[in-house]
Image: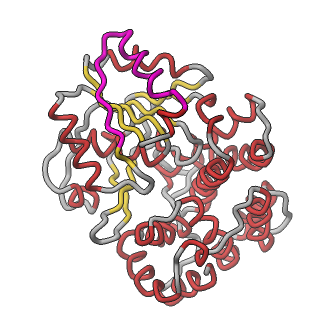
Amino acid sequence: MEFQYYLPVNLLFGRGKVSEVGKAASKYGQRTLIVTGENSSKKSGLLDRVRTYLESEGVYSVVFDKVTQNPLTATAVIGAEIARDYSCNSVIGLGGGSIMDCAKAIAFLAENGGDINDYIFNRITGETALPIIAVPTTCGTGSEGNGFAVLTNAESGDKKSLRRNSIIPALSIIDSELMQTMPKHVLSSVCFDALCHSMEAYLSRLNQPLTEYMSLQAIKSISENLIDLYNGSQEPEKWDAVTWASTIGGMVIHTAGVTLPHGMEHPASGLKNIVHGRGLAALTPVITDASFSGAPEKYEVISRLLGGKTASECGDMIRNLLQSVDLNIKLSEQCITKDDIPWLTENCFKVSEASIKNHPMLFDKDGIAKLYEQAL
């Protein structure tokens, strides 16, 4: 057995831990940029709380609240300009995965000039970034646990990750109390994304002992707790469980990568700005039905964790879970049409070549086009 594992994450986990954000930010200087969305952190009062915590430690904060779902490369450019204009010493990502991803890109661009697309496609290197403090408010992407920042280029429709160790957060404050304000439809979507991260990392050709162990624990935690939370449970232990599973999901894909479900979903949300977790919900069962013979032992393990017995049942077990959280949907319900399939297929090979290769069964362009059609 030979493998290498390197992921310098710094996690502060616990209910109420968000109160330590001021102390954490003060270590990097007296000015920070808070990256957040237009509404949720304001409505919940969290943004005001965080600014108060910062002020109590002598840290001045500037708020950048222009991030939307499927964050744009252009938005990151604007945020970086603000960070430089105000001489910010750090960047705080306060929100869901889109917020944290954009915060990472802003921190990176604040220290590196040029076109961010050149960095995303690795035409240019660049290994520095402002210190990042991630404060997730959804239990989905696990962005707090890795060095990925997924961005969409609005001009080309390309949705692809900036990947650098320099954008691994200097500190991630993971407080499951912050998750409890999510609407049910957001909870189901983000948790399915987290589940897919761990399933895909486990199935990946780059999987290794540490990622395998962590992935299986995360799959089990989401399987055992998501439906209860969706149905209204407020048990702190259950919120802790899915929150930790989300962070694990982010950590394992940093090392093992993702496979075909994410590879095929990114073109769909890049083209039509659909909700990422909903796109995955449409694609994952179809891809699973077509792939389980490529790694029957692993698909059987996933199937059993989701309540089934055999590899061939895995797709149906995923559908059962989706049905339980009102997420059993099709791509056609998300503005994707048959006419989009040629572009989606070509773009998949452009932006997701690594994910295609990581998948346990290899598909050519005709095969991927057929999967898109079946997911309609």
Q: Which residue is at a point 44% across and 79% down the rendered structure image? A: 344
Compared across the picture, whether 154 is left or right of 315 comes to: left
Query: Height in image: 201 above or below 147?
Result: below
Color style of the picture: secondary structure
Q: Which residue is at a point 49% across and 34% down the rendered structure image? A: 41
Location of residue 243 in the rendering, given as x and y in whole percent from the top left corner? 63, 37
On whether residue 212 falls in the magenta region, the answer is no
Location of residue 138 in the rendering, given as x and y in whole percent from the top left corner? 56, 41
Location of residue 171 in the rendering, given as x and y in whole percent from the top left corner? 42, 28
Query: Height in image: 34 above or below 372?
Result: above
Location of residue 34 in the rendering, given as x and y in whole percent from the top left corner? 35, 32
Compared across the picture, whether 177 is left or right of 308 comes to: left
Whether residue 94 is visible, yes or no, is: yes
Q: Quadrant of residue 118?
A: bottom left
Compared across the picture, whether 1 is left or right of 112 comes to: right
Q: Which residue is at a point 35% across and 74% down the rendered structure image? A: 350
Q: Which residues are magenta?
A: 44-65
Residue in the foreground of this view, choosing between 53 and 212? 53
Q: Quadrant of residue 168?
A: top left
Query: Height in image: 10 above or below 322?
Result: above
Q: Which image quarter holds the C terminus? A: bottom right
Compared across the picture, whether 64 is left or right of 144 comes to: left
Picture mark count:
0
